[in-house]
Image (cartoon, grey):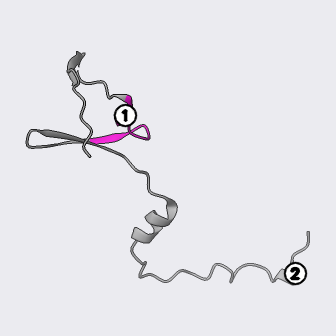
Amino acid sequence: MTIERHVRLFRNGANQAIRIPKEFELEGREAILRKEGDHLIIEPVTKKGLIDVLAELEDLEMEFPDVDERLPAAEDVTL
């Protein structure tokens, strides 16, 4: 089922604007607006979680140095 609502366009300074009715509200504080032909499409910006970001990273091809080699042995450390 498609929900439609007639809205009026108005000016807000140099920008054309509309008020988004409550039943069309988007979550969050940001959206992406794009134009496809005569259609304007508004999509909420979804923030990726840390797991999603890490999954997109490419594997590193370098070897990491041994950072423990200059540390004293655990039994030599006093508190």
Local secondary structure at mark 1: helix
In the figure, 53 relative to 20: above or below?
Answer: below
- The one nearer the camera, 60 or 36, is 36
- Which quadrant is home to the C terminus? bottom right
What is the residue that sits farthest to the right in this orientation?
Answer: 79
From which residue to which does the magenta span run? 22-32
Find residue 67 and name its label. none
Identified at 44% across, 71% down, the residue is: 55
Identified at 21% across, 26% down, the residue is: 6
- The one nearer the camera, 79 or 54, is 54
Q: Looking at the image, is mark 2 or mark 1 nearer the viewer?
A: 1
Give the CA separation, mark 2 to mark 1: 66 Å
Identify the amino acid type marked 2.
Answer: Asp
Q: Residues within 10 Å of mark 2 (few under 14, many from 20)?
A: few
In the figure, 12 relative to 1: above or below?
Answer: above
Q: Position of residue 1 (x, y in %)?
A: 26, 46
In the figure, 20 relative to 57: above or below?
Answer: above
Residue picked out by circle 2:
76
Q: Residues within 10 Å of mark 1 (few under 14, many from 20)?
A: few
Residue picked out by circle 1:
23
What is the residue that sits farthest to the left in this orientation?
Answer: 37
Identified at 43% across, 51% down, the residue is: 47
Q: Position of residue 46 (x, y in %)?
A: 40, 50
Q: How many marks?
A: 2
Confirm whether the magenta stretch covers residue 64. no
In the figure, 46 relative to 63: above or below?
Answer: above
Identify the amino acid type marked 1.
Answer: Glu
Residue 14 in sight: no
